[in-house]
Amino acid sequence: MRSRRNDGRVLIYSHDTFGLGHLRRCRALAHALVDRFKQLSVLILSGSPIIGSFDFRARVDFVRVPGVIKLRNGEYTSLNLHLDISETLSMRASIIKHTADIFAPDLFIVDKEPVGLRGEVLETLKMLKRRGTRLVLGLRDVMDEPRLLEPEWQRKKVLPALRELYDEIWVYGLPQICDPLEGIGIPQRVRQKMVYTGYLHREVPTHGAPPPSSSTRPTRCATIRRARRSWRD
């Protein structure tokens, strides 16, 4: 990793509300990075109310922005502060940009939401782009169904950011397993930015786990998405 200093700095953004998935993924990524690069420091920006309950390795730290929670109607509201959601989002955006300005990362990784919650990282992306910071969007290998994801990204005006701001799109998986953007009208110049990283290493208990089967075949995206829907239901 190239750096303007003797050390390297990575900033990771996660819009987290209450879910553990985003936070655990960012933590696993941060730990993998500091394991490999011994002069690297990683700072995680998160709205998770429980991020302080997690243990982090040396050279990994976090900044918590004011939390929000998603309501049943799909709208967001402030988690703890008695503030209008627009005020909360304005505070979050300001903290994110100011942190990025001072921390001056060599690499900025945005988890899942290309422009952040309600566009809160867009100005930070533009600022860092002007500075020459490498910008990466990180995606899990299985996203929502194309019929849901494509109109959502159109509404959020995601495509210009993918086309003009991001240098790479990291997919945490393998291409033979799943293409997270399958069925979505993404220009070829954006698809060329996709880099499959393989799966992030996670520590899991092995006691009592069944032995792996040699006959297991890769599961296609649609099957995995159906399984995810059944878990949510």
Image: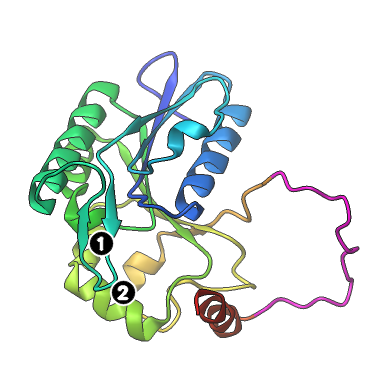
Could you say which quadrant of the image residue 91 lies in?
A: top left
Which of 174 and 206 lies nearest the eye of the viewer? 206
* Residue at position x 48%, y 44% in the image: 26
Which of 48 and 41 lies nearest the eye of the viewer? 48
* Residue at position x 25%, y 62% in the image: 163
Q: Which label belongs to residue 20? A: none
Which of 16 and 186 lies nearest the eye of the viewer? 16
Please tell me whether residue 210 belongs to the stretch shown in magenta. yes
The residue segment tinted magenta is 203-219
* Residue at position x 87%, y 50% in the image: 207
Q: Residue furthest top?
A: 6
**First-in-chain label (2 vs 1):** 1
Q: Is residue 89 left or right of residue 228?
A: left
For the residue carrying disc 1, how many other residues have a C-alpha within 10 Å: few (<14), some (14-19), or many (20+)?
some
Residue wearing tag 1: 163
For the residue carrying disc 2, how many other residues have a C-alpha within 10 Å: few (<14), some (14-19), or many (20+)?
few
* Colouring scheme, one of rainbow, by chain, secondary structure, one colour: rainbow
Could you say which quadrant of the image residue 193 lies in?
A: bottom left
Q: Is residue 160 above or below residue 83?
A: below
Q: Is residue 168 left or right of residue 116?
A: right
The answer for how far apart the CA atoms under marks 2 and 1 are is: 8 Å
Kind of element beneath mark 2: loop
Could you say which quadrant of the image residue 13 lies in?
A: top left
The reply to whether dot 2 and dot 1 touch (C-beta < 8 Å) is yes
* Residue at position x 9%, y 50% in the image: 84
Residue wearing tag 2: 187
Q: Is residue 221 left or right of residue 118?
A: right
Q: Is residue 40 above or below residue 27?
A: above
Image coordinates of residue 180 in percent, x first then y, are 47, 71
- Label 1 sits on what residue type? Arg
Image coordinates of residue 77 in percent, x first then y, are 20, 56
